[in-house]
Amino acid sequence: MNETPSDAELCGWFDSLSNWGRWGDDDECGTLNLIDEDKRTQAAGLVRRGVAISCAQAITFSADSDDPWPASRRFMNKVPQAEAFSPDFVGRSSANDAVLLNCHGSSITHLDSPVHSFFRPAPGRPMAGYNGLAPTVVTGREGARAGSIALAASGVVSRGVLLDIPRARGLDWLAPSEKVFPADLEAAEAAQGVRVEAGDILCIRTGHPGRRRAEGWQSTAGQQAGPDGACLPWLRERDVALLACDTACDVFPPDKGHMARPIHCIGIPAMGLWLLDGADYEELAAACAAEPRWEFQFTVAPLRLEGCTASPVNPIAVL
């Protein structure tokens, strides 16, 4: 499908694309089950030059992004004291800081857990998360009592595949709110000589971070290119373990009258699909094109945050 599906189609996919019960009725890990020891071993075998590349946005402490919720605040608890600048002083002086991080938002690279999204596909049906979890598992006092980001405490390591959509079209980046369809994914596969396989981490480059740096962070605020809801059956068919985009894994804003963020609405609660939002693939894309090679070991290590629905991450690609 290369047309935006109707909301009725999307709601129908909640059942037809469901992974509920696939790994057991009590499973909370969803598509991370697709990454096993063999998959991690395969990923390790892709390391040839030992070049490591960060795929995270820089966490800054100034309001220079289009995120309405600032990603972070820094508090300096201690700075070097006057004695540190005296030539006669012998000893140690130190600086200490504390940082407050938002676990979600377009200006911070983060990994969503299965209880980030709940969905009701039809009137009269219960609002539900992956594998039938009720939204009551997340409370204001305790946070997530199931399905939290702590499920990925050992890290996510698998074969990463970067599909560079603008490069396949001969562009530097996609326009704001431009949709990525399954045909675009397959065209990038063909152009790059690579294929997305079961258990892979699929990295989609739209060029959004590069465009923002070139045009300014306040230009077209709130608009992001990204995968259309039409990609959901493709992601399920290919058994992608983790979808990692350089935007919020959804085109935004949606067309008038269409569901907002269908990848989040259907992918997370129905498929148990893990999402990594807000990556930066500009350096990685240049390195992959220079080789050329578009597969690598990809590692995502969330903070071990008990009860949280996401974690800031610094994804590392090793070529």
Image (cartoon, rainbow, N blue to C red):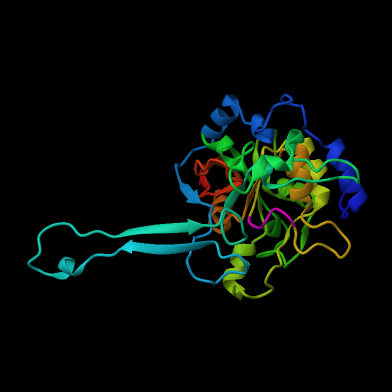
What range is drawn magenta here? 246-250
Compared to 282, does 221 lie above or below? below
Residue 77 colored magenta? no
74 relative position to 272: left or right? left
Q: Quadrant of residue 122?
A: top right
296 relative position to 275: left or right? left
* Depth order, front residue of 282/199: 199
* Depth order, front residue of 270/57: 270
Q: Quadrant of residue 173?
A: bottom right
Q: Position of residue 212 (x, y in %)?
A: 61, 69
What predominant SS class does the magenta segment belong to?
loop
Residue located 64% across and 45% down the image = 139
User: Is residue 73 at all visible to an observer of this figure?
Assistant: yes
Q: Position of residue 68 (x, y in %)?
A: 63, 67
Q: Position of residue 136 (x, y in %)?
A: 71, 42
210 relative position to 114: left or right? left
Residue located 56% across and 30% down the image = 40
Residue located 54% across and 52% down the image = 55
The residue positioned farthest toward the left in the image shown = 88
Q: How many marks are shown on the rendered structure? A: 0
User: Is residue 242 at all visible to an observer of this figure?
Assistant: no
Q: Position of residue 238 (x, y in %)?
A: 75, 37
